[in-house]
Amino acid sequence: MKDEFNFDVLIIGSGGAGLSLALKLANANTRVAVLSKFALTAGSTYYAQGGISAVFDADDSLESHLSDTLNAGAGLCNEEIVKLTVNHGKESIDWLREQGVIFTEEQTISGETKLHLNREGGHSHRRVVHTADATGKAVSLSLIERAQENPNIELFEHHNIIDLITESSTHGKRCIGAYVFNSLLSHVETFAAKVVVLATGGASKAYLYSTNPQSSTGDGMAVAWRAGCRVSNLEFMQFHPTCLYHPAGNSFLISEAVRGEGGRLVLADGSAFMHHFDERGELAPRDIVARAIDHEMKKRGIDCVYLDISHKPASFIREHFPNIYQTCLKFDIDITQQPIPVVPAAHYTCGGVLTDSFARTDIENLYAVGEVACTGLHGANRMASNSLLECLVFAERASEDIKQKLPQVTMPKNLKPWDESKVSDSDEEVVVAHNWNELRHFMWDYVGIVRTDKRLHRAMNRVELLKKEIAEYYAHFRVTSDLLELRNLVIVAELIIRCAQQRKESRGLHYTLDYPELDSTQPAQNTVLNPNGFIASLSK
């Protein structure tokens, strides 16, 4: 049983960001390890339905994409980062096509083919490149295939990060590797690397209802925080407005593209309601649509609302949304003839580990790409289909910086091995399940779509108690995947609450009844938490 591995670059996460970066880095001189907590296809990228935003239409423009993103971000986007991202949209799509991704096309009047573009909420034009309604699956499978073919990339499934390994440097701290739990062997391994990259995704599983797979437990954010990195804007948790409401549906996402193609949100009697909340109706940004649905559900005491696209031709629906059609049919819902019951659910973490334009964190040789990072692109609300674009653009940016850095970095040696001599196997694993359940319930009830100071205070009290219980449990028993996820989730839950407590206004995805308006007394500011004593600050 091998205890230690050595690689030039260690990438933790096998989604769109992690695999793209691996493919851009791996060559004869650079050996790359990619860790996947579960199977390679278990991350959020695989389940992304909508697509990737990029300007291809002649009537569209980079300026329009920029403007739409800034508007959705409610004053908190970093404009230079947004420009950087939208300017690289087309080349990112071209790169994916080179990797074998096949996107949906359509014929023009002249008989030529071109990319079919969807329109989603917040976008003023059709600019969402997609593969039917399973874009993430197409991207994920193509990148996995390319990575498996590359002799300089080694893929490790069922490997869950425990903590980063750091040492002192002239700049403060340097990352030199990670302790990793091999869940297949129930064994802790040490990975040494010149450069470490976090590509672990978001933290939506902190909530009771989520569209995300089991892997979205905030691992990268928690390990970065424990190592000494700042985090930013974690109060901005995006709740997707439309998830299938069905006991066996497992929070199946109903793509925003359904609304983009004319789907209407209605009550049980068929009456529409979105026009009461926003002139853009169903195509308003996600925070507005999610709050509108939440309002109607609470006002009327109903369990769900409905998304109806049955007025469209059945052939159109089956062609554009084959995955959604087939999945709903399994639950006896024929979306060509009846509306889909839907509810909001936690979907995307807009904040995360604070990074610069090259994906560098506060710790030397540690990078963060994808949903785990806070780049400044999303601000207070992510615009639909900008997330996969961010993965691709910042994978490229990180690769540029890492390629320049690697020749000057020596391979770390003599890393301290993992010590579990003072722990034993747990005799009460039920504690983990109970704590997990409690955490997700109070986060949903108190730190959900609509918040108050009192709710946040209640949530913080419960987090403090759980932190103590989990820390005691972690100190006495051998690690398991469930324990590691719970340990990370309680940290991220605390960071979400602390960020929310700092913001005395309603902005973007953060809506509080105590401060229902924007704070017009000062410029829009980002929330930043520093691990050195939980120093909180607001900065532009």
Image (cartoon, rainbow, N blue to C red):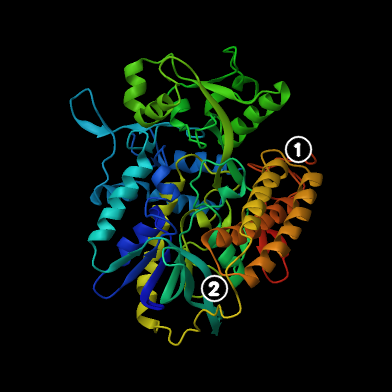
Q: Residue furthest front?
A: 427
Label 2 and label 1: CA atoms lie apart by 37 Å
Res. 354 visible in picture: no
Q: Secondary structure at mark 1?
A: loop
- Callout 1 environment at 10 Å: few (<14), some (14 to 19), or many (20+)? some
Left or right of 89: which side holds 429? right
Q: Residue at x 61, y 46 (%)?
A: 237
Q: Is residue 463 left or right of residue 378?
A: right
**Residue 406, relative to residue 158: is it above or below?**
below
Q: Position of residue 161 (x, y in %)?
A: 49, 66
Q: Quadrant of residue 172?
A: bottom right
| Residue 346 x, y percent position in the rendering | 58, 42
Q: Which of the two residues, 439 or 288, is positioned nearer the viewer here?
A: 439
Q: How many numbered tags mark residues here? A: 2
Query: What is the quadrant of residue 217 in the picture?
Result: bottom right
Kind of residue sitting beneath label 2: Ile
Point 67% across, 50% down: residue? 439
Q: Amino acid at mark 1?
A: Pro
Viewer-nearest residue: 519 or 106: 106
The quadrant in which the N terminus is found is bottom left
**Crowd around label 2: few <14 · some 14–19 · many ≥20 (10 Å):** many
| Picture residue at 37% right of the left edge, 32% below the top | 323
User: At numbered mark 2, what does the secondary structure look like: helix, strand or loop?
Assistant: loop
Residue 363 tag number: 2
Q: Position of residue 273 (x, y in %)?
A: 62, 19
Query: Would you say residue 18 is visible in this rendering?
Result: yes
**Residue matched to label 1:** 516
Q: Earlier in the sequence, mark 2 or mark 1?
A: 2
